[in-house]
Amino acid sequence: MYLREQLEALGYTILSVTGDGFGGIKTAFSGIPYQMCHVHMERIIIRGTTLNPQTEAGRVLLFMVRTLFQNIDSNTFSERLDKYVEIYRDFLNEKTIHPDKFKNKKVGVGRMKI
């Protein structure tokens, strides 16, 4: 029996799910509103920008993701994120290769929808 069915069999009513951004939880609870954990979202951004971003776009993105903890509603954050993408579209479409690891270091802005 799957986790969702086990919980529902125990009498739980699942109103929403918060997860780490990976597909397993979202898939297991399909049809139920899903939100990515704000801490995981911040960690993904920090992993891509560091704690001291060198670009304006990185600094703005890090500032934005930290506003998640200020109890703003999802519509306000989504509007800010859309505006960010509009302003920094050219920068976001560039591909940056880390000189030592040769891995794509572009930040996953698309995963930040809440």
Image (cartoon, grey):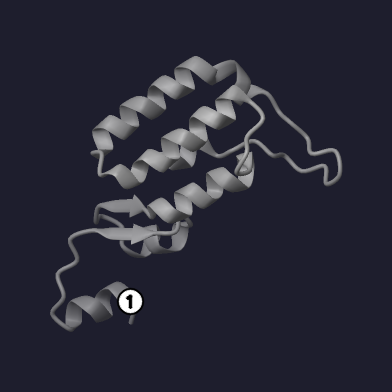
Say how many tags the image has.
1
Residue 82 in view (yes/no): yes
User: Residue placed farthest to the front in the image?
Assistant: 52
Q: Is residue 3 above or below residue 38?
A: below
Q: Nearer the viewer, residue 109 or 71?
A: 71
Name the spot of residue 27 as percent of width and height, x first: 39, 59
Instruction: In this rendered view, identify the residue nearer to me: 60 or 30.
Output: 60
Pinpoint residue 43: horizontal percent, then vertical percent.
53, 51
Secondary structure of the residue carrying tag 1 is helix
Q: Residue at x 47, y 23 (%)?
A: 85
| Residue that extends furthest to the right in the rendered view of this protein | 100
Under mark 1, the amino acid is Leu
Is residue 114 among what the camera can see? no
- The relative height of residue 14 versus residue 66 in the rendered view (above or below) is below
Q: Is residue 85 left or right of residue 55?
A: left
Left or right: 105 as drawn, with respect to 13: right
114 is higher (above) or lower (below) than 89: below
| Residue at image coords 55%, 39% | 108
Q: Is residue 19 above or below residue 90?
A: below
Residue 25 occupies which quadrant of the picture? Answer: bottom left
* Quadrant in which the N terminus is drawn: bottom left
Label 1 sits on residue: 3
Q: Residue at x 36, y 26 (%)?
A: 80
Residue 65 or residue 2, whichever sits in front: 65
Q: Is residue 108 left or right of residue 78?
A: right
Estimate how packed mark 1 is, as few (under 14), some (14 to 19) or many (20 or more) residues with alpha carbons within 10 Å.
few
Looking at the figure, which quarter contains the C terminus?
Answer: top left
Q: Nearer the viewer, residue 83 or 95?
A: 83
Q: Residue 51, percent across and down?
A: 60, 43
